[in-house]
């Protein structure tokens, strides 16, 4: 009886619960179905009639993927096109192109970091270059004769200031004084180079009374250091000779009465111009070195004279100077078409120098007569080569004739015809060096290197910051000569730096030397850390040249 009552009570309870469940339910329109948040207990699902989640949690509603009802799709989800789905990225194997690209990116990042580091440390690299090649430069300058009575600054400080005016490529004394007026620039200069920076008017007073031969001797000693260190050994001609180009250049125009040695010329309208020229002997190399070995002034003698001084007369004096300063240095003289004459041949023979000179049409007529006659009958004296340069095809044909006699001098004639883009160029030279099939290319290249004294030498000093032609001292001839020697010393130091592995990697793309020097001067105008300076100066650096 009790069991029957329990069963009846359970059935009634179930009926009541089902009734309340139907009452709390809402009618859902066709095409839409929503469901409240639910919890699972056991295997069934219980939904709160009020839409509230159990345990007091806020209801979460989510869209159920639409089903087709009466031919319609659920409005809660828009149709998705197949082609708009994201494609899965395929994993590339380790040897694929993406790995190579990533390696290249990492390499470029490393190169960029190295370039930034080198660019930041330019001034330290310059200081390191000077201390590497010329560690006793300050002591050598201190040994020079000092003609001053009052000595507030040491002689080495004054001469170093003049050299650094050219090293920093300021172009005038006033421009360097403007840099000196910046407190940070002056402090950094004295910190890095361990010398005080005087006013350039004080420097000019010393330049007016110092003997030019002292600074020229200093330059010769510095070149001797480079020769002993074999800095240019790999660039020697035929593996033995140092190429030395001889050429004259204009230094500056001056007013009448500047000195007793001024050259002068008169124009067609009767105007007289006074000026100074020099004859330079510069050592040139394939990678861009163009360093002054000797300088001879082209100037008129005091008193009366029949003819003005000229380049050929100056060469006689310059040759004696070169032989005295470098008695055992094997030299190959490279000269233009002005020099093929008996005096030039005799000087080179007496000094045991090899020489190469440009040979113009009409020079030494008897030699040209022999050349034109022997060209038709000489065999085995032709060589050709094809060179590709910047997508240009260049065809070169070499011809040579040996053992030509000219008044007791043995001469060798050779010619190079260069054809490119239907344009033919002709280069003709004579030399006292033996010619053959193996060395004709190097002989021709040596003759064409005469242009380097114009490009890497005079043009750089005139138009790229050194101020060759500027009147650093208008009234003093002695000061003018001393400034010129300081310019040659500074140009030598800058070449050792600019052509080295510390500087060349920065010249990528359209980066220029001028911009990098501007960056270096900008760093000099800001405070430099002494700790960083000491760390960089202690670092070992290897100098390499292309």
Image: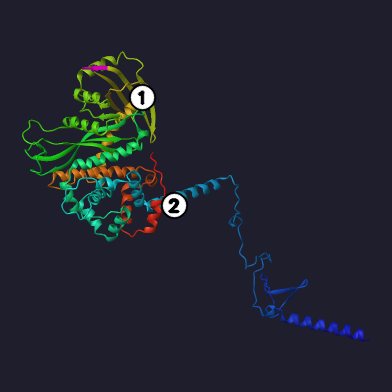
User: Does the image show residue 396?
Assistant: no
Q: Which stretch appears magenta?
A: 404-408
Q: Please name the residue that numbered disc 1 is placed on.
A: 439
| Mark 2 surroundings within 10 Å by alpha-carbon count, few (fewer than 14), some (14 through 19), many (20 or more) | few
Local SS, label 2: helix
Q: Position of residue 273 (x, y in %)?
A: 10, 40
Q: Position of residue 132 (x, y in %)?
A: 35, 45
Q: Position of residue 528 (x, y in %)?
A: 35, 58
The verdict on residue 291 being magenta is no
Q: Are marks 2 and 1 in contact (CB under 8 Å)?
A: no
Q: How is the image coloured?
A: rainbow
User: Which of 13 and 215 lies nearest the eye of the viewer?
Assistant: 215
Label tally: 2
The verdict on residue 406 being magenta is yes
Left or right, residue 214 beside residue 70? left
User: Does the image show residue 238?
Assistant: yes
Q: CA distance from mark 2 to mark 1?
A: 44 Å
User: Which of 223 and 120 lies nearest the eye of the viewer?
Assistant: 223
Q: Please name the residue that numbered disc 2 is placed on.
A: 113
Question: Considering the image in quadrants, where does the N terminus appear?
Answer: bottom right
Local SS, label 1: loop
Residue drawn at the location 36% of the way across and 16% of the way down: 380
The answer to whether 258 is drawn above or below residue 247 in the figure is below
Question: Considering the image in quadrants, where does the C terminus appear?
Answer: top left
| Mark 1 surroundings within 10 Å by alpha-carbon count, few (fewer than 14), some (14 through 19), many (20 or more) | few
Residue drawn at the location 29% of the way across and 41% of the way down: 222
Q: Position of residue 151 (x, y in %)?
A: 19, 54
The answer to whether 158 is drawn above or below residue 268 in the figure is below
């Amino acid at each position: 009886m009790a069991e029957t009552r329990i069963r009846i009570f359970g059935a009634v309870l179930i009926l009541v619960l089902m009734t309340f469940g139907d009452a709390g339910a809402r009618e859902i329109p066709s095409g839409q179905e929503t469901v409240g948040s639910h919890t699972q207990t056991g295997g069934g699902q219980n939904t709160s009639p009020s839409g509230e989640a159990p345990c007091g949690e806020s209801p979460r509603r989510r869209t159920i993927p639409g089903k087709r009802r009466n031919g319609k799709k659920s409005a809660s989800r828009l149709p998705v096109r197949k082609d708009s789905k994201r494609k899965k990225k395929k994993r590339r194997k380790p040897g694929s192109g993406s790995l190579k690209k990533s390696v290249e990116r990492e390499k470029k990042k490393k190169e960029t970091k190295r370039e930034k580091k080198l660019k930041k440390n330019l001034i330290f690299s310059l200081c390191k270059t000077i201390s590497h090649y010329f560690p006793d430069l300050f002591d050598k300058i201190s040994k020079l004769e000092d003609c001053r009575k009052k000595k507030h600054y040491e002689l080495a400080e004054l001469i170093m200031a003049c050299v650094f005016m050219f090293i920093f490529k300021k172009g005038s004394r006033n421009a360097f004084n403007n840099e000196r007026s910046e407190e940070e620039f002056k402090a950094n200069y004295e910190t890095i180079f361990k010398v005080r920076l005087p006013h350039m008017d004080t420097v000019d007073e010393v330049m007016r009374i110092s003997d030019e031969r002292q600074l020229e001797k200093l330059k010769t000693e510095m070149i001797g250091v480079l020769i002993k260190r074999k800095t240019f050994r790999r660039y020697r001609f035929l593996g033995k000779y140092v190429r030395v180009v001889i050429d004259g250049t204009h230094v500056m125009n001056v007013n009448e009465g500047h000195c007793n040695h001024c050259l002068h010329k008169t124009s067609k309208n009767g105007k007289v111009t006074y000026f100074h020229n020099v004859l330079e002997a510069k050592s040139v190399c394939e990678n861009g070195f163009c360093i002054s070995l000797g300088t001879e002034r082209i100037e008129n003698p005091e008193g009366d004279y029949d003819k003005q001084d000229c380049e050929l007369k100056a060469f006689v004096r310059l040759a004696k100077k070169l032989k005295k300063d470098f008695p055992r240095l094997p030299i190959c003289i490279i000269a233009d078409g002005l020099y093929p004459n008996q005096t030039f041949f005799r000087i080179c023979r007496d000094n045991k120098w090899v020489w190469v000179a440009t040979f113009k049409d009409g020079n030494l007529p008897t030699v040209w007569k022999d050349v034109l006659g022997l060209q038709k009958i000489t065999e085995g004296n032709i060589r050709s080569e094809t060179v590709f340069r910047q997508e240009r095809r260049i065809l070169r044909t070499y011809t040579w004739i040996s053992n030509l006699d000219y008044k007791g001098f043995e001469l060798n004639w050779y010619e190079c015809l260069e054809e490119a883009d239907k344009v033919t160029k002709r280069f003709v030279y004579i030399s006292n060096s033996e010619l053959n099939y193996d060395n004709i290319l190097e002989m021709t290249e040596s003759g064409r290197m005469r242009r380097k004294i114009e490009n890497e030498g005079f043009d750089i000093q005139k138009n790229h910051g050194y101020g060759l032609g500027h009147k650093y001292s208008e009234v003093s001839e002695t000061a003018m000569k001393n400034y010129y020697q300081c310019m040659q010393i500074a140009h030598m130091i800058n070449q050792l730096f600019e052509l080295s592995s510390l500087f060349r990697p920065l010249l990528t793309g359209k980066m220029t030397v001028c911009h990098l020097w501007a960056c270096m001067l900008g760093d000099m105008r800001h405070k430099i850390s002494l700790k960083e300076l000491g760390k960089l100066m202690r670092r070992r650096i290897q100098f390499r040249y292309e």
